[in-house]
Image: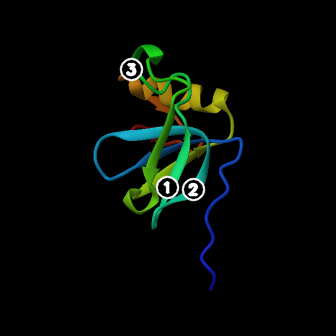
Amino acid sequence: MKDTLPNFAGKIVSLSTGSENALELESPVFRKMGRRMFVVGQVPSGATTDNWAAGLPCAIAWEAVTDYLVFDTPKQFQKLMLPSKTGKEKRSTTGGTVRR
């Protein structure tokens, strides 16, 4: 079976490395740098406190990623993720609590 990389075009993706922190990227793409594969994108609005990093380029090594969430639109990202960043809970459409 051939390994394929996911297509995140037009999406916002929250990538986790297993620590408590996650990295959100807008429309990330895969880029090989040296011998390593990276996920490269821009920090979306609302991903950092006071939006200090919004629009900045950012990358994470794909081998470091333990799990990820895909948001279809910036509006969905804002609705589901921002309450968790402020410490408030938000109910997901599947009935579970959305938290990081």
Q: Are marks 2 and 3 in contact (CB under 8 Å)?
A: no
> Pointer 2: what residue?
31
Q: Residue at x 45, y 67 (%)?
A: 35
Identify which amino acid the numbered label 3 is placed on: Thr
Q: Residues within 10 Å of mark 1 (few under 14, many from 20)?
A: many
Position in image of residue 86 (x %, y %)? 38, 20
Q: Residues within 10 Å of mark 3 (few under 14, many from 20)?
A: few
- Which is more N-terminal, label 2 or label 1? 2
> The N terminus appears in which quarter of the rendering?
bottom right
Give me the C-alpha separation between circle 2 and circle 3. 32 Å
Q: How many marks?
A: 3
> Pointer 1: what residue?
38
Identify which amino acid the numbered label 1 is placed on: Phe
Give the foreground label among 2 and 3. Answer: 2
Nearer to us in this view, 10 or 78: 10
Residue 30, quarter of the rendered image: bottom right
Q: Residue at x 41, y 56 (%)?
A: 65
Residue 41, quarter of the rendered image: top right
Position in image of residue 83 (x %, y %)? 46, 24
Give me the C-alpha separation between circle 3 and circle 1. 29 Å
Q: Are marks 1 and 2 in contact (CB under 8 Å)?
A: yes
34 horizontally vs 4: left or right: left
- Which is more N-terminal, label 3 or label 2? 2
Residue at far right of view = 10
Q: Residue at x 47, y 27 (%)?
A: 47
Q: Determine whether 49 is above or below 2 in the image.
A: above
Q: Which mark is residue 86?
A: 3
> The C terminus appears in which quarter of the rendering?
top left
Residue at far front of view = 34
- Which is more N-terminal, label 1 or label 3? 1
**Mark 2: secondary structure:** strand
Position in image of residue 11 (x %, y %)? 66, 42
